[in-house]
Image (cartoon, helix red, strand yellow):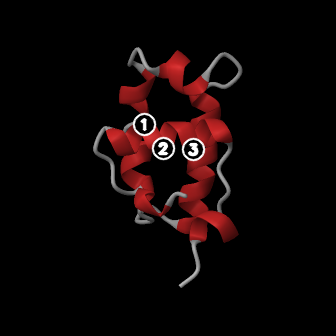
Amino acid sequence: MSNPWDEDFAPSAAALNTLRWAYEMGASTLGEAYDMLDQFENSNDVPEVLGHDDTVEGVREELEAGLETVGPDVPLSDLT
């Protein structure tokens, strides 16, 4: 089976870092990670995860596009 992360949805470095953060916080799918964005936005982890050049809103838009492309049930464990 092909990996939808590589073929259909190629997240930016900021989105990947956010998805890793969500995975560490207990999310197991793209949909769950998206649902955690408000928690992420209110956490002290934003500067460490995103740096100074990226925004939570930019990541939110990117993940919304990913949800439309690959769906909410794609496992975060498939990230390589």
Residue drawn 59% across and 41% down?
15
Please name the residue that numbered disc 3 is placed on.
16
Q: Nearer the viewer, residue 18 or 56?
A: 18
Badge 3 marks a residue whose secondary structure is helix
Image position of 49 (left or right of 24): right
Q: Is residue 18 above or below residue 49?
A: below
Q: Position of residue 30 (x, y in %)?
A: 45, 55
Image position of 40 (left or right of 4): left
Please name the residue that numbered disc 1 is placed on.
21
Q: Residues within 10 Å of mark 2 (few under 14, many from 20)?
A: many
The kind of residue on which mark 2 rests is: Leu
Residue drawn 39% across and 40% down?
22
Q: Do callouts 3 and 2 mark residues in contact (Cβ within 8 Å)?
A: yes
Q: Position of residue 64 (x, y in %)?
A: 57, 49
Residue drawn 41% across and 27% down?
40
Q: Is residue 46 above or below residue 35?
A: above
Q: Is residue 37 above or below residue 80?
A: above
Q: Residues within 10 Å of mark 3 (few under 14, many from 20)?
A: some
Please name the residue that numbered disc 2 is placed on.
19
Q: Residues within 10 Å of mark 1 (few under 14, many from 20)?
A: some
